[in-house]
Image (cartoon, grey):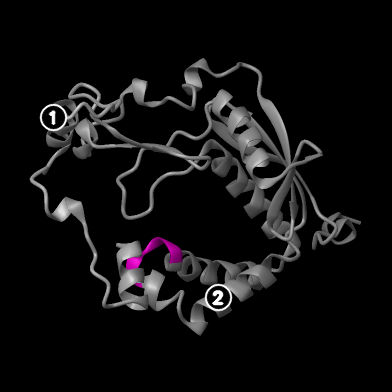
Amino acid sequence: MRFELAYKAIAPGLQIIAPWREWTIRSREDAIAYALAHNIPIQQSTANIYSRDRNIWHLSHEGGRLEDPANGPEESMWQWVVSPERAPDTPAEVEIGFEGGTPISVNGSRLGPVQLLGELNAIAATHGVGRIDLVENRWSGSSPAARMKRPGHATRDGASRTRSAVSGSRNIAFPATLAFATPSWSITACGSPRCAKLWTLSFEYQQRVTGTVGLKLYKGNISVATRSSPYSLYRTELASSP
């Protein structure tokens, strides 16, 4: 829908060909039967019927028994993150560095975005961090790395910006994200000055979210251990008793 509405907004005269609306395939079982009949190699079967999407942000499953919210995920679906019960008995300590709201290092090593996500994914998945079971309402789950970055960013955020700045940032974050995640907003917002202003404000709000956050990972849980920032608003002389 996002792509289609974009085409309609930019070139309303274009004919959109959507095979899903024209063929007789109406279920995953139909799609599997079609693939088998035409010798199309697929991983799915009637016993392994889930649709899977995987990238550096997530590995998601849908379909099959998951179409009934009363059913929980099977252990075999968790192909990335180990079970918290089987995670190491010794916690992992991870320090994430931020510059202007962007994570730029892991345990002191400066990494590019893809490398950084890969490093955090490996650490988090090993310690059972990143499993999410949800009923999808347009937005889906996220990666082990994302589960680590959120508390890290939030902690760094709260330590280096005023309460009103944090509140203002969160107020604009939702509509700014909506512009990319929801079909109608993708067109009405991203093509307008409103979207540009939202993103400009968002980037300005993030400039002081700089420093490091230490996290402890243990059997599926994340706790914040340390935080440090050159822009920290915390003052020991004010917080300590005389």
C-alpha separation, residue under disc 1 versus residue under disc 2: 47 Å
For the C terminus, the image quarter is bottom right
Residue 33 disc label: 1
Location of residue 86 in the rendering, given as x and y in whole percent from the top left corner:
50, 16
At a point 55% along the width and 66% down the height, the residue shown is 170
Residue 198 disc label: 2
> Does residue 99 appear anywhere in the picture?
yes
> Is residue 203 depicted above or below 64 in this figure?
below
Residues packed near mark 1 inside 10 Å, few (<14), some (14 to 19) or many (20 plus): some
> Is residue 232 depicted above or below 38 in this figure?
below
Q: In which quarter of the image is residue 71?
A: top left
Location of residue 213 in the rendering, given as x and y in whole percent from the top left corner:
73, 45
* Residue at the extreme bottom of the image, as rendered: 193
> Is residue 154 depicted above or below 90 in this figure?
below
Location of residue 171 in the rendering, given as x and y in whole percent from the top left corner:
52, 71
Magenta span has 170? Answer: no
Q: Point out the stretch of residues depicted in magenta.
A: 180-184
Q: In which quarter of the image is residue 182?
A: bottom left
* Residue at the extreme left of the image, as rendered: 24
> Is residue 71 depicted above or below 99 in this figure?
above
Please tell me which of labels 1 and 2 falls first in the chain.
1
